[in-house]
Image: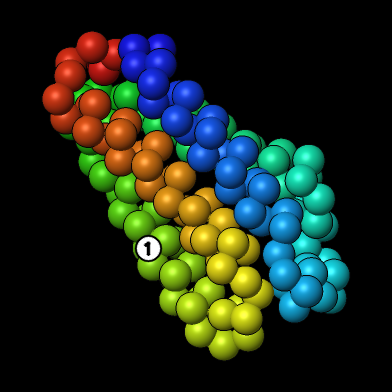
């Protein structure tokens, strides 16, 4: 853990995202109920979901840096970052149009923050792989 500030910031963003996802407005609550989004229906479940997705991103990024040679790790991390950016763009598009735009600003922000966290994790790991030799084979 070279930069504890990053992990503290990540923890704060994970808790914020879980709170935003667990507290939609009335239309959002109806949507969560109708579409059976049980994984975000309460704060503990949303926290587990967001923390789990973020933990998987951290593990994937760390494994890419640790187990692959530098050029392969950089390519893999670039692809993961691009995949995260695609997910972020899709989420922004989905939650700013149609019925989802009625679910409340907080819920929409939480739904867009989750792929943003993934991009943040993969982007930081990618940047670290580009600028540092430590931790890469």
64 lies above or below 54: above
128 lies above or below 38: above
Q: Where is residue 107 in the image (x, y as percent from the top left)?
A: 62, 63
Tell me if I can see residue 9 in this picture.
yes
Q: Position of residue 74 (x, y in %)?
A: 23, 35
5 lies above or below 104: above
**Quarter containing the N terminus:** top left
Q: In this view, does 42 lie to the left or right of 54?
A: right
**Quarter containing the C terminus:** top left
Quarter assignment of residue 88: bottom left
- The residue under the point 57% across, 56% down is 110
**Which residue in the structure is indicated by mark 1?**
86
Q: How are the residues colored? A: rainbow
Task: Please rate how many residues cluster around mark 1, counting C-alpha atoms within 10 Å: few if below 14, some from 14 to 19, many from 20.
Answer: some
- The residue under the point 26% across, 17% down is 136
- The residue under the point 57% across, 80% down is 101
- The residue under the point 34% across, 12% down is 2
Q: In this view, does 134 lie to the left or right of 63?
A: left
Of the pair 102 and 55, the residue shown nearer to us: 102
Q: Is residue 68 left or right of residue 7?
A: left
Of the pair 15 and 40, the residue shown nearer to us: 15
């Amino acid at each position: 853990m070279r930069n504890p500030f990053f992990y503290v910031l990540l923890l704060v963003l994970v808790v914020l995202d879980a709170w935003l996802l667990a507290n939609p407005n009335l239309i959002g609550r109806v949507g969560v109920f109708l579409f059976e989004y049980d994984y975000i229906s309460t704060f503990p479940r949303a926290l587990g979901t967001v923390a789990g997705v973020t933990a998987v991103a951290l593990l994937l990024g760390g494994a890419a840096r640790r187990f692959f040679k530098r050029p392969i790790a950089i390519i893999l991390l670039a692809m993961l970052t691009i995949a995260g950016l695609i997910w972020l763009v899709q989420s922004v598009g989905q939650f700013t149009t149609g019925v989802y735009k009625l679910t409340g600003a907080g819920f929409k922000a939480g739904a867009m923050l989750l792929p943003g966290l993934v991009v943040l994790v993969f982007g930081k790991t990618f940047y670290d792989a580009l600028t540092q030799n430590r931790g890469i084979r």
